[in-house]
Amino acid sequence: MQIDMFVLIALLMGAGSSGTLAVFAFIQALKKQGTCWFAFLCVCFVFYAGGYALELKSQSLELVLLLIRIEYIGIAFLPAFWILIVRDYEGGSRFKLPAPMFFVIPAITFVLVLLQDKHSLFYINPTIRVINGMTILAFERGPWYFVSIAYLELALVFGTFVFIKGAVTQKIYRRRQALCFLAGSLLPWVGNILYLLNLTPNGIDFSPVLLAAAAPFFAWGFTRFRLHDLLPLARDRIFEQMGDALIVADALGTVVDYNRKASDLLPALATKNDKSVVSAHDVLLPFLVQQELPLPAEPPLAFQVATLQGKRSYTVAATILLDKNSHLMGTIYRLSDISDQVALNDRLLHLASTDELTSLMNRRSFFERGRLELERARRYGRSFSVAIMDLNAFKTINDMHGHTIGDRALCLVSQLCASALRTCDFLGRYGGDEFVFAFPETSEDDVKLVAGKLRQLVCCATINSGTIVITLSASIGTATAIGSELPELEELLSLADKRMYFAKGRDQR
């Protein structure tokens, strides 16, 4: 078979296979983000190989130059898509520029080719010659031609370097992927070098053939080794389905990824679109007790902040990601729902500090708060008063009417006394039928007036036991101290207890 027929068949087959792969890749791109750039790369192959096949059989310079413009739809933009494929393979760790930046040089190249008859920056003095039935374009190379070629070669070299590195350093499944992509990247690189060095027969450019031949290697890498499926698979199965809300921020604190749980939980993420930029600080601010999010630069590399969002409680844990040189790469924030634990802790705390029958403070809780108030009074030289109340003949009520009636009496007394106190006053069940009171910043005369009012409330209270009406009564004793010489709480209560028993003896005469 003559070489011209071989080249034409190879070009047409390459264009056809690239077109088929492009359609396949676009279909896959609807499901998997990783195949998007590969689909566009295959389109570039179609324009390059198909246009070059027609160029070789053209009969005029005008038609050749027209076909050149069509070919450069693929040639000009090919290196940009190549770089983006390689960048995705590395997970975006290199070339953090936005994707449009890689198309600046290709766009200039394409415009210059479209306007090639207006300048001498690309093709200079183009002519054609026919060799073995094929039309070969001859021209002098302008300055921008070398720029475009350099960009293409750098893209190919970059891909080759990355895939060689992956084939040597990655784990076994990534190594096979890297080898597959390496084979695909070497073919066009070698073909382009041979053409630039005029080592191809009759000056034919074998680059489009070899580029088209590289496409199946990339397709094999996408399908056989599921190169770009690995990240979405892990994301769908783990990242998206985790019960915790996860937010990933880059080194600048900008949110770059989050799962559905975070979107449902955080209003700032629910309204975020793919193009909007939002910082992790702004997203998490409603969850933080502090006004700014701490971001420790040294170990420990994680911290937790207990927060409350509505009726749900969360912890916000931040884990800092560092590279091999200990440079900050980003932060992963994990919001864990601990509402059940908080509710359980609150319940246990309530049980530990509250009297089950009357819902007042129990003895331990009263002493804890009482000591705090006493210390405050001692610090500022203010008065502090206490009182102890005991129900009269309460044992008789229990013995004659039963403990249920006795419990009703205790609950009634606790409600009456609680309703008569100021917001700063507090009381608790001291034990049995005894109640204890604390009155911050209350003088001795004032506490005696309050004690009298409380006793009067109880003495006016009645409860029914069937047809029998039981009238309650109580005795109360008070104690007051002032200034820095305030005694301990136990001493004040002991004094109030003695006065209560003295009053009880007097009340029962």
Image: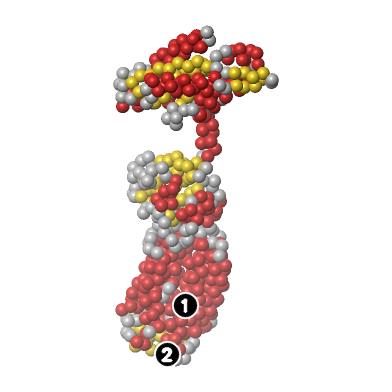
Report which quarter residue 465 is drawn in.
top right
Looking at the image, tell me whether mark 2 or mark 1 is earlier in sequence order: 1
Q: Which three-letter amino acid code belongs to the residue tagged 2?
A: Leu
Task: Tell me the number on the disc at residue 317.
Answer: none
The residue under the point 41% across, 52% down is 282
In the image, residue 119 lies at what x, y percent?
A: 33, 85
Q: Which residue is mark 2?
A: 61
The residue under the point 46% across, 81% down is 70
**SS for dot 1:** helix
In the image, residue 175 lies at what x, y percent?
A: 47, 55
Q: Which residue is mark 1?
A: 48
Q: Which three-letter amino acid code belongs to the residue tagged 1?
A: Tyr
The image shows residue 61, relative to residue 381, as above or below, that is below
Task: Note whether residue 492 is visible.
Answer: yes
- Crowd band around label 1 with a 10 angstrom C-alpha radius: few (<14), some (14–19), many (20+): many
The image shows residue 296, relative to residue 116, as above or below, that is above
The residue under the point 47% across, 61% down is 274
Task: Note whether residue 239 is visible.
Answer: no
